[in-house]
Image: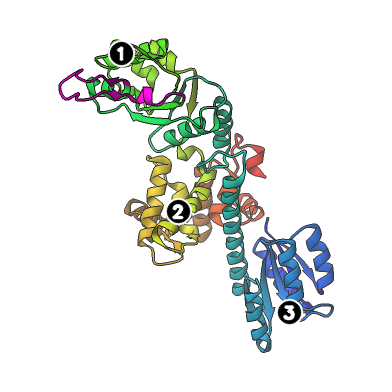
Amino acid sequence: MTRIAVIDDEETARKMTGRILKKAGYSVETFESGLPFLRKMEQDPFDVVFLDLKLPDMGGMEILSHIKFIHHWTQVIIVTGYGSIDNAVEATKEGAFHYLTKPCRSHDICLMAERAVEKIVLHQENDSLRSQVKHPDLLPGFIGSSKAMQAIFSTISKVAQVNCNVLLEAETGTGKQLTARAIHDLGPRKDAPFVYFNCGGFTEELICSELFGHEKGAFTGADSCKIGLLESASGGTVLLDEIGEMPMSMQVKLLHVLQERQVMRVGGTRPVNLHIRIIAATNKDLKQEIRNGTFREDLYYRLNVVTIRLPRLIKRLDDIPLLIQHFITKVNKAYSKKIQGVTPQALELLMLYDYPGNVRELENIIQHAAALTEGKKLTPEDLPSHLHKLHFQNSSTEELLPMDELEKRHISKVLSKTKYNIRAAGEILRIPRTTLWRRLKKYGISVKENSSEAEKK
């Protein structure tokens, strides 16, 4: 829960601000002077601070300086009278989030707290992204903190150290090439070549020529000797993408290469020894292809020493906000923009969409929205038409419902889509977890029994 401190020597103003924020669902502590607050802040930092500049024991600017030193995420909102607005503006230049003038309206207090929390979330996401770049235990190029991805990271780290063939089973857009590259980069072959070849859409002759190479004069047009991709990857790794598309006759030849660890160039008479690792990737169910007679069972078991199944994006919902921020950072550099994030409404749509194109589709959606937006945050109107239409369809079908019923249905829908993950639901709804639990109790909504304890906390 977001923790807020209110520091004001005026008892009426202090109690009123605290009461408004508690009613909004925040955890609030009030202080009439600066020193008791700073002692508490050092022990357990607050997320947001409402600070009166004029206090009996020390100046507000001094307190602001201490807060920023203790905890850089904490957002400070200056509360002051009209006569001290210049001081409040100066405080914002020194790191305060914003300022309010007394007497403060309830709406302004809550709105300022909400915006401060949004900035904290943005800071945390940016720090998390930076830590993924710097932290040696995390894999290069990967974004994700969900349980599904942590399991993938662990498997990649282990299999990278073992010189065995790997089969990647995953839908398009889930990161097969990125995974293969991580296995290569983390293993003992990292300084040797990494070679990619897509097996789909090519004839057997072309695949043979590309993978195995050919001697001069081996066929019409072979004017010179060509080294194949397998031979060129000596000491390194070869990723055979879409292996399920490889013609059956070519599968026999690949099986022989895997068994003998030798390749014969087309038109050649002398085998070439291979010292490579093979990673094969597919979006097909190869066991079903074996039953259909379109994939060799013996080749399957040669490739399938270790299988890694990459999850669909819909199976790793917790990673979507982090991925969104990552892609926004990328498009800001590419498009010279200064987009800060997405609105809660846009985030809700992005969390509810099923992403048939997985992570790649999410990146395309963010690129589309970033190219069209004129604001600092992406809105539902910036998203592609199929998401935009969904936004208005949802709005039009529910706009005539009573407020309580509308809220109950919306909370239920978000919980269902997040698989009853309280933390993820709270982020979408933009309300503290305690507030969400109160709503659940009010509307008699029960959390499914298969929701883990970690998700409920």
243 with respect to 16 (left or right) = left
User: Which quadrant is the N terminus positioned in?
Assistant: bottom right
Give the quarter of the image for residue 77.
bottom right
Q: Does label 2 or label 1 sit earlier along the sequence?
A: 1
Quote the CA–CA distance across marks 3 and 2. Answer: 39 Å
Q: Position of residue 229 (x, y in %)?
A: 35, 26
Residue type, label 3? Leu
Q: What is the magenta range?
A: 212-235
Give the quarter of the image for residue 274.
top left
Look at the picture and state if 161 lies above or below 140.
above
Quote the CA–CA distance across marks 2 and 1. Answer: 44 Å
**Which residue lies under the disc numbered 2?**
330
9 with respect to 318 (left or right) = right
Q: Position of residue 255 (x, y in %)?
A: 37, 13
Which residue corresponds to the image point at 76% horizontal and 72% vertical from the top-left? 63
**Which residue lies under the disc numbered 1?**
293
216 is within the stretch colored magenta: yes
Which residue corresponds to the image point at 58% horizontal and 69% vertical from the top-left? 111
Residue type, label 2? Lys
290 is within the stretch colored magenta: no
Which label sits on residue 53? Answer: 3
Q: Does label 3 or label 1 sit earlier along the sequence?
A: 3
